Amino acid sequence: QSALTQPASVSGSPGQSITISCTGTNSDIGLYNYVSWYQQHPGKAPKLLICDVSDRPSGVSTRFSGSKFGNTASLTISGLQAEDEADYYCSSYTTNTSLIFGGGTKLTVL
Amino acid sequence: QVQLQESGPGLVKPAETLSLTCTVSGSSINNDTYWGWIRQPPGKGLEWIGSIHHSGSTYYNPSLKSRVTISVDTSKNQFSLKLISVSATDTAIYYCGRDPDYVPNHFDFWGQGTLVTVSS
């Protein structure tokens, strides 16, 4: 099964809002509300930001929010901060009882 | 706070077996949750390998299923990964994590990761 499709890079200035898209198919994102988002800083393990499309785990900033429309999920980061510069990955459960990730998006804070 | 720690050889020869163990602390591996492995080739994206429940129920990535075995040792609060017939493409940072759902969904706690290089 192919990876979910994410833009390779996005950028924004401090204080702005940015959105990262994650496109799948009607066998994964389009069928299940099991979409998650992770943030990964260089040399660190990924950190869960969003689960089940739009739920924020305890301790995650409210500046991070998730949504889904059809086969595409989105992560929005509002009030961009320098510390948000990192790689971001989406994931989804699929019809063949597996988990697939997106290729990752590098966020640059200008 | 749940903590996970990967351990195992950092270098494996081609065609041999990669074996890693994840030790869980701060939580019982017998809790009703899945525990899994994820890998990341250097400079590349994440790939889910598979997940296991303390009951022994497993889910595997279809692309790796023929080479992967994940097992659990409840007496040691550990779970393990075996990947046979490795090649250079299996070189990656291997992470273990906790998936609190009933299907492969999301990982809320991760180990720090361990780099495994496949080379002669």
Image (spheres, coloured by chain):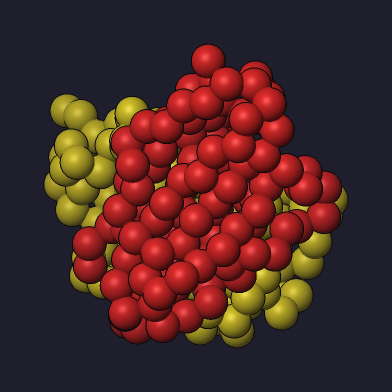
Chain colours: A red, B yellow
A35 or B30, which lies in front? A35
Locate residue B33, reporting x and y percent: 67, 74
Locate residue A63, reporting x and y percent: 73, 43
B15 or A104, which lies in front? A104
Q: Residue at x 33, y 28 (%)?
A: B43
Q: Residue at x 39, y 47 (%)?
A: B46
B73 with respect to B51 (left or right):
right
> Is residue B110 shown to the viewer in this render?
no
A94 relative to A67, above or below? below
A64 with respect to B42 (left or right):
right
A8 or A94, which lies in front? A8
Locate residue B1, reporting x and y percent: 84, 50
Q: Residue at x 42, y 51 (%)?
A: A21
Locate residue A7, reporting x and y percent: 33, 42
Instruction: Check the image and name the residue furthest to the top.
Output: A110
B81 with respect to A53 (left or right):
left
B35 with respect to B87 (left or right):
right
> Is residue B3 shown to the viewer in this render?
yes
B116 relative to A85, above or below? below
Q: Residue at x 35, y 48 (%)?
A: A6
Q: Quadrant of the C terminus of chain B?
A: top left
A86 relative to B69, above or below? above
- Residue A61: image quadrant is top right
Number of marks present in the image shown: 0
